[in-house]
Image (cartoon, grey):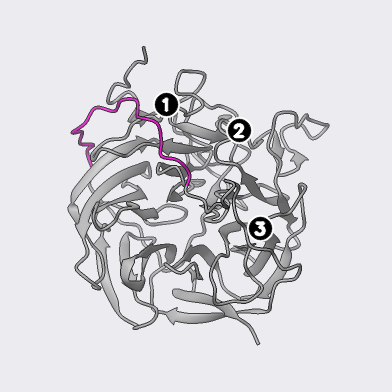
Amino acid sequence: MSATIQPMQVFRHRVLPVLVSVLLAACGTPSASQSAAITASAVEPTRSVEPTRSVEPTAPVASSSPGGSPTVPPIAADPPALALETVADGLAAPIGITSAPGGWLLVNEQAGRVVAVHPERGDRAMTVDLTDRVLGEGERGLLGLVLHPAWPTEARAFVHYSDSNGDTVLSELTGSQDGDEAPVLDPATERVLLQVDQPFANHNGGQLAFGPDGHLWFGLGDGGSSGDPQGNGQNPSTLLGSILRLDISEAGAYRIPDDNPFADGGGAPEVYLYGLRNPWRFSFDPATDALWIADVGQNALEEIDRLDPQADAGANLGWNVMEASRCFADAGGCSSDGLILPVAEYGRDLGCSVTGGNVYRGGAIDGLGGWYLFSDYCSGLLFGVRSDTDGTGVAPRILLETGASISSFGTDENGELYVTDIGGGILSRIVAGG
């Protein structure tokens, strides 16, 4: 008989705070000069449903052939020329993009606002303002946003932000969307689902996404500083340095899916993957269900990981034993046995902080289908890797020199790709180049 998880034991994971006195390089989530610290009162968790074990997750929703195997279009050997087309400017440190019905894109700004943008009509609206409870400075802020997959019938949304103490908060909000108007979320409906103490100011991760299994996936960095001094990456019993997988089928709380790898012990039950330094954006390929993770490096390498979200449950991605494909903790040598090595990586000659993207499955750019696109915040380079790449440590293709500080990728309802420039305050669409 499985035991239930008691409230306030799961919801608050504590680690000892440590002072940071050195400037760290390649720390992950970019900062922006226009971002200001917000002083806010703490948000107390509210509970209406005690977390329990979940029912079996829903089956993946990948497209299939009559025989049951995924049907994936062929991938061009060479991607086409690309360009960026501005669809909105004047945004304040935009760091996230979420698709909403009716052609809307929800852009979360670091300081705590979510601005709805309609790329085709040029309309804008305020979806929610959480600046009264978000600390939006450095690598902190409103780092993640996702709507329930059944939105607006199931009018629930989920946010990840840094609270006034700099600690991680995962919350649920309710809202509405009237016809083709922009979605609206009510800040007064906030229900805190999970809080995690952060020992340092950097490496907060941020991504929220619903997987093909219908569960909420949540990425957290290793807690910060340099070199993972607390060993969080290799400790599945902490939520730091991990990607979590939560069942949010009931409002106001989360459950542990029965098939989470540590549901019955050996690690924190929320943890699905571990060994990450700072996963700055991950996504699922809608054609294959593959999970793509961009993990920010320490001194030498930025990495892209590709996993099977079912077969790789409980996988160890290596940090801080390794930095991408190289030994880190022991420069004299280490073993990669049992670790997931990156499908692609690049060094300091091409950038210093990777920004994860998406596999392109839109229809507007001929020859781009099946390419995974991502960028580097420092260099502004837009990269591509074939999603069917075989092997590890593949060098990415440079597709475009953007000159932008790309902080996030996102897709619209048609699978077209967009990026945010945190420094320029711009939302752009990726289009075919000349």
Under circle 1, the secondary element is loop
Q: From the image, which quarter does the C terminus lie in?
A: bottom right
Residue 361 or residue 198, whichever sits in front:
361
Residue at image mark 1: 258
Q: In the image, residue 370 lies at what x, y percent?
A: 63, 62
Marking on residue 412: none
Question: Secondary structure of the magenta portion, mostly?
Answer: loop
Residue 58 or residue 87, whichever sits in front:
58
Please tell me whether residue 16 belongs to the stretch shown in magenta. Answer: no
**Circle 1 residues within 10 Å: few <14, some 14–19, many ≥20:** some
Amino acid type shown at disc 1 = Asp
Q: In the image, residue 103 lies at what x, y percent?
A: 36, 72
| Vertical side of 93 occupied by 248: above or below | above
Q: In the image, residue 267 lies at what x, y percent?
A: 50, 23
Marking on residue 352: 3
x 70%, y 72%: residue: 79
Residue at image mark 2: 315
Under circle 2, the secondary element is loop
Please tell me whether residue 50 belongs to the stretch shown in magenta. Answer: yes
Q: In the image, residue 136 lies at what x, y percent?
A: 37, 56
x 61%, y 33%: residue: 315
Q: Nearer the viewer, mark 2 or mark 3?
A: 2
| Vertical side of 28 occupied by 315: above or below | above
- Can residue 207 be seen here? The reply is yes
Amino acid type shown at disc 3 = Cys
Question: From this viewpoint, which residue is outermost toward the top?
Answer: 1
